[in-house]
Amino acid sequence: MPSLPIELYSEIAQYLDRSDLAALSASTKIFHALATPMLYRDIAIHRSSSVEQLTKLLQTLVDRAADITLLVQRLELDWNTADFSARPSIALMLHVGLLRMSALTYLVINASLCTLDGVTMPALREFHLAYWTELDRGFLARHPHLKRLSLGGWHGGLRQFRDPMPQGLEYLRMSSAPFALAFLKRLPHGKDAKLARIDLGVSHGREQLEGARSEILKLLHDSFPTVSQVSVFGKYARNVLEHTRATGTRGSHVTRVGVPGYGYARDHDLRGIFVDVARVFPSVRTLDLLGREDGFHIQLLSNDEIARIVQGIEGLDHVDLVIFPHGKAYSRSGNDGFELLPTHVDDYPQIFWPNL
């Protein structure tokens, strides 16, 4: 249909899935030029993907760097790394590919591979890394325009990144309390602060870290008036809230709080963490119950029961929205409690780290 304008083809292509786009790209030169940027703009490799699929993709990016790698804007790599023999070749190809992705704005690597030494992605704005122990110390200094950052698995001693830190950072998610505290101290404070949200993972209950975790919340209260959203997740999240409550620290400007919503066999246990939230965050209006990839994992309480518990907690009477895993949300309906909303709330980024 050569008489149709190219703009119409472009509009139609927006509605095609990846398999149809691939078929369209292989049909004619015109369609190839139209579909190829769409095929490679957003790339995602999930855990169900095979090592062969990942290797083939990375090899294509290496071999066709001049016409494909430059098109990639979002790259999400979340795959099973059980095949240790393939790691060296995957790491090498990924390293070479990332060096050439000048348009990349979003990167997720949810696997243990050291591939980022010396890499600079000038357009990068959002970066999520599951294992960051071996991330080179100059990485953040080479990416000053980062807005959203999460660093997961952490082992060993404290390794400071070189200055400058990304001064416009709006979202930070970390599993190391001492490192997160040191990081926050190097961001702009007061009227110059940009940080709006922080997520702190707590996968162990070592007492020597409690002080750092509480100091983080105190620093947020004193120096980051821009922070309106805080999440504390992991096995020992309640320990952090209990300790913070005991020290008298309050996050009075925080209006949205996320806490674990799984693993509670009795309403008494869940009620306890809600009481701590009410004391530490007296201005909370939205409550996120955080789950694992399969929802609540072990949860004997229904959503309705949990919403009723929230309704009965003194200090949570200002909460008007309770959001469950996968976006199910309950809105307060006057004095009659909460009711399930007909639409999902899907504004919570689903970045999952192993073992947290």
Image: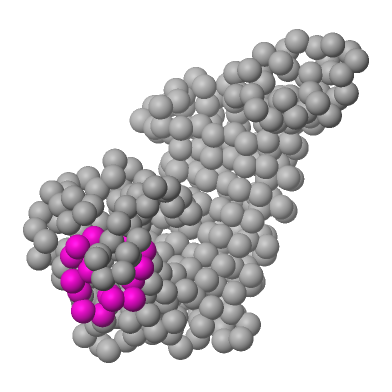
Q: Is residue 271 above or below residue 66?
A: below
Q: Residue 318's image quarter?
A: bottom left
Tell me if residue 90 can be seen: yes
Q: Nearer the viewer, residue 256 or 222?
A: 256
Q: Nearer the viewer, residue 305 or 194?
A: 305
Q: Is residue 140 above or below residue 315?
A: above
Give the left or right position of residue 105, taking residue 131 as reference: right
Q: Residue at x 22, y 45 (%)?
A: 297
Give the left or right position of residue 174, taking residue 167 as reference: left
**Tag count:** 0
Quick check: is 311 in the magenta stretch?
Answer: yes
Q: Position of residue 65 (x, y in %)?
A: 74, 31
Q: Residue at x 55, y 56 (%)?
A: 136
Quick check: is 2 in the magenta stretch?
Answer: no
Give the left or right position of residue 51, taking residue 176 as reference: right
Q: Position of residue 105 (x, y in %)?
A: 66, 49
Quarter in which the N terminus is drawn: top right
Q: How is the image coloured?
A: one colour
Tell me if residue 210 can be seen: no
Q: Is residue 228 above or below residue 42?
A: below
Q: Position of residue 263 (x, y in %)?
A: 17, 53
Magenta range:
307-322
Q: Is residue 202 above or below residue 164?
A: above
Q: Nearer the viewer, residue 146 or 91?
A: 146
